[in-house]
Amino acid sequence: MLIESNDMIPITKLQKQLTKKIRDVAQSGKSLFILKNNEMQAVILPVEEYELLQHAEEIVEHFEIADTVETRMSKYNKNKNTDWEIVKKKYEL
């Protein structure tokens, strides 16, 4: 991932300019990458980008669930089903 240097800020500088930087992120729609000891430690995202990531995560989860269901259904054998009436009788339900 290529990040422009003006989109990065040391955490000590961010502490002094937090309000302004939050406003900049909200207005520009660009993420702000926070550095500590010259290593990336965190990212401040615009709300729209965060929501997009949340939605993407939900889509991935749906695909994982669909894959699990498909795998289980491929092994499903209807002949191994137990009639509900038998279960009720066995467990006195």
Image (cartoon, helix red, strand yellow):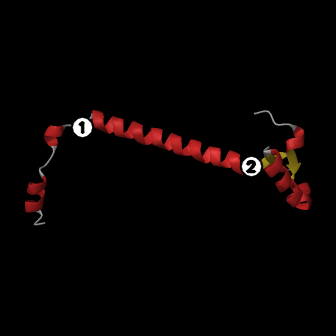
Provide residue 31's location: percent of width, then percent of height.
Answer: 78, 45
State the residue position of label 1.
76
The amino acid type, in three-letter code, at marker 1 is Tyr
Provide residue 85's location: percent of width, then percent of height.
Answer: 9, 56
| Image quarter of residue 70 | top left
Q: Residue furthest front?
A: 27
| Image quarter of residue 81 | top left
The reply to whether the C-beta atoms of the residues labelled 2 and 1 are less than 8 Å apart is no
Crowding at mark 2 (Cα within 10 Å: few <14, some 14-19, many 20+): some
State the residue position of label 2.
46
Image point (86%, 37%), residue name: 4
The amino acid type, in three-letter code, at marker 2 is Pro
For residue 34, say whether it is visible: no
Numbered label tally = 2
Check the picture and name the quadrant holding the N terminus: top right
Image point (24%, 37%), residue name: 76
State the mark number for residue 86.
none
Q: Is residue 68 above or below residue 35?
A: above
Provide residue 37's location: percent of width, then percent of height.
Answer: 86, 50
Left or right of residue 64, residue 38 in this image? right
The secondary structure type at the circle numbered 2 is loop
